[in-house]
Image (tube, rainbow, N blue to C red):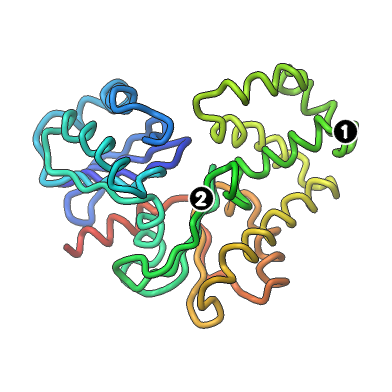
């Protein structure tokens, strides 16, 4: 039996699998070695996973995670996983996890639209081209963190409609000053921005909100998807954002000149299939 984990900055999905059968599923907080130490990651694993995940040594642990794109950060994650499971571990990026989960062993273009965003061209086993995501400060176009950043900035600068901004501050019981203090002092600001962006999903009929989300998706297409052979390969998406705003994403894709082959919430079903074939 194996453990497969798929982690964003916000949430980690874990499964115990026997071949193609999922024996047990669990969820913990997201883990990201760019924002967390080895000790913090280990505590999250040990304290939030059910005891059943630690009852024996497993055949292998496959971990796909945000922030796991370099050997240095992968070592942080690997050491935490090995310490907890005492089992051989493979750590890969969340982008490779998305590609394998969306396309399994077929070539195509895989995109993440969740707390953050990313994209790649995949050959059926490995990533062959990747536009760097750059995180919520320099990139993450179209993600929940990006939407939260754009809306909060507009609300504080009095650019967003006044009634919408007032409803936002009342809903979360925050002020512009307290919100700025929170975001600038947060250890995981992208997670906080993504949480606040959920407010937009409740006001999707507001023309300002619709246009903000549409523009963010168009920016994702022009700054990321345009770099790939997108007219010849299937284009697939995974993440909470692409599911939550599927209709707007479809419109942006059409206006950009592409069609979406798949948009799903989780990569896990495809990852189970991928690793069952090994």
Q: Is residue 107 above or below residue 183?
A: below
Point out the residue furthest to the right here: 162
Q: Is residue 278 above or below residue 29?
A: below
Residue at 22% x, 58% y: name it.
275
Closer to the camera in the image, 218 or 70: 70
Q: Find residue 185 and report its horizontal and vertical position in percent.
A: 58, 20
Q: CA distance from mark 1 to mark 2?
A: 30 Å
Residue at 56% x, 35% y: name it.
190
Secondary structure under badge 1?
Answer: loop
Q: Find residue 163 and report its horizontal and vertical position in percent.
A: 89, 31
Marker count (numbered): 2
Closer to the camera in the image, 187 or 30: 187
**Is 98 left or right of 141, judged from the image as shown?**
left
Locate the C terminus and report the quarter of the image it occupies. bottom left
Mark number, residue 239: 2
Closer to the camera in the image, 223 or 46: 223
Q: Which residue is mark 1?
A: 158
Secondary structure under badge 2?
Answer: loop
Q: Is residue 135 above or below residue 97?
A: above
């Amino acid at each position: 039996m194996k453990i497969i984990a798929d982690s964003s900055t916000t949430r980690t999905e874990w499964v115990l699998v026997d071949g193609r059968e999922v024996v047990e599923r669990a969820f913990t907080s997201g883990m990201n070695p760019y924002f967390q130490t080895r000790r913090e990651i280990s505590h999250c694993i040990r304290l939030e996973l059910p005891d059943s995940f630690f009852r024996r040594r497993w055949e292998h642990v496959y971990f796909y995670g945000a922030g796991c794109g370099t050997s240095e950060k992968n070592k942080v994650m690997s050491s935490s996983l090995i310490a907890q499971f005492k089992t051989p571990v493979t750590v890969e990026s969340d982008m490779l996890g998305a590609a394998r989960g969306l396309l399994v062993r077929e070539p195509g273009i895989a995109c993440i639209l969740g707390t953050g965003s990313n994209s790649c061209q995949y050959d059926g086993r490995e990533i062959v081209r990747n536009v760097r995501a750059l995180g919520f400060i320099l990139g993450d176009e179209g993600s929940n963190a990006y939407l939260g950043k754009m809306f909060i900035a507009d609300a504080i600068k009095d650019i967003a409609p006044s009634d919408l901004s007032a409803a936002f501050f009342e809903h979360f019981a925050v002020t512009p000053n307290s919100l700025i203090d929170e975001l600038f002092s947060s250890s995981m600001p992208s997670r906080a921005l993504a949480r606040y962006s959920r407010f937009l999903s409740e006001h999707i009929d507001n023309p300002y909100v619709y246009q903000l989300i549409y523009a963010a998706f168009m920016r994702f297409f022009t700054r990321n998807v345009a770099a790939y052979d997108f007219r010849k390969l299937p284009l697939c998406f995974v993440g909470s954002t692409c599911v939550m705003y599927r209709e707007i994403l479809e419109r942006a894709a059409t206006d950009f000149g592409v069609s979406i082959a798949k948009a799903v919430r989780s990569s896990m079903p495809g990852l189970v299939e991928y690793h069952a074939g090994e």
